[in-house]
Amino acid sequence: MKVIKRIMVWSILPLCIELIGLLYVDKIYLKPSSDYTIEKVEEKKEKVVKNLEIPLDENAQDIKLSYNGKYISYVKDNNIEIINTLNGEKVNVDTSSEGELNYYTWLPDRNRMYIGEKVRNVNGESSIKLYYYDRDKNEKNQVIDNHYNKIKIPLANSKYNIKDIVISTLTGVSYIKVETNNKRYNIYRLNTMSQMEKYKGYIRVGNVQILNRDDRMIYEDLAYGRVRITDRENSLRIPGAEKLCLLGVDTEDRIYLGRVRNDKVDKIYYGTIEEDEKLWQSKSIAGAVDKEDIYISSKGKVYINHKEKNVITELFSGAEKQYNGKIVQYYNKGVGTLYNGKFVKMEL
């Protein structure tokens, strides 16, 4: 009997201690305090100046626009200067003291850029370190892989340079085009874990693009005048088009090719890799134009720049837009132009 009582006492005692602890937390520790203040948190609204014209330094080089046209950037004195096109605010992105700026590009769907900086190692060998810069956070960091290794591209010659980077933020894959010599290029692939590998070497390649939803690179094979897709044996072939050039890819992964005749594009073909190229749609251009004067928007609109008339025409709708000066770059809703030393945006 005594044993049973002793067991009951030792069983009830922990329960009582637990109840006392809960009572203390509820009545004392979590008791509402009468000494408190209420603060209203308001999101800071960005100052906007309508029809803002931005003076650009005559020494500005490599002028580029972010995807939404909010920022314009250019290179000056080995640094990148970025100006907010809504209010004129400026920031500088400094190059590291050990290197020199080699290349930069904005990402296709956010206010972030990739930056390549060329450095010389202690043993005399050169490489390009890859950084990313987030403009909205004003943060710059070197790209690292999933094992925290800093990413850099080894260069067999210090004169080699990055010429292009194409990026899919959906798959997290990038392809980096590095010029070597004799107009040939090495292609490096940065996978979803930011691991770098040499993908193709010493090839004659022109325009390079990437699909958004599939890890596939599309590129111009200049040796044969073909457009090729990685992991596919045969090049893209369009009946009636002996020579093709790559114009762009939209967000729906439609590929846009131009038929080249006498070094001009006179017809555009478009479709997906799932479709037979014989079934791709096409649209003729009234008067052949240079490849560089054709722009494919992310939404699949085709803009043609008629420089002699300062007019931009949308191929499918026929809509025209007059502009002044020189086109700097397109963005997702319009185009930026430079006129009399000032940069302005124009919606299309």
Image (tube, grey):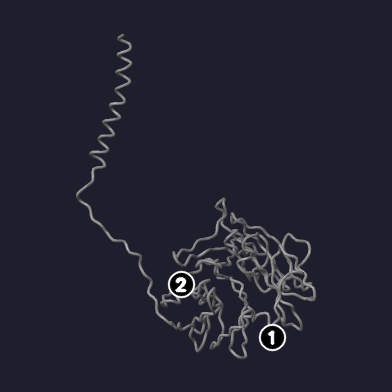
The residue most toward the top is 1
Name the side, left or right, on which 235 lies relative to 248: right
Q: Amino acid at mark 1?
A: Ala
Q: Amino acid at mark 2?
A: Asn
| Kind of element beneath mark 1 | strand
- Specify which label sits upstream in the sequence, 2 or 1: 2
Q: Quadrant of residue 272?
A: bottom right
Quadrant holding the N terminus: top left
Residue 259 in the image: state x and y as whole percent: 74, 77
**Within 10 angstroms of label 2, few (less than 14), some, or many (20 or more) residues?**
some
Asked if residue 243 is positioned above or below residue 107 in the image, the reply reads below
Q: Quadrant of residue 178?
A: bottom right
Q: Are marks 2 and 1 in contact (CB under 8 Å)?
A: no
Identify residue for label 2: 92
Whether residue 242 appears in this view of the structure is: no
Residue 335 in the image: state x and y as whole percent: 54, 79
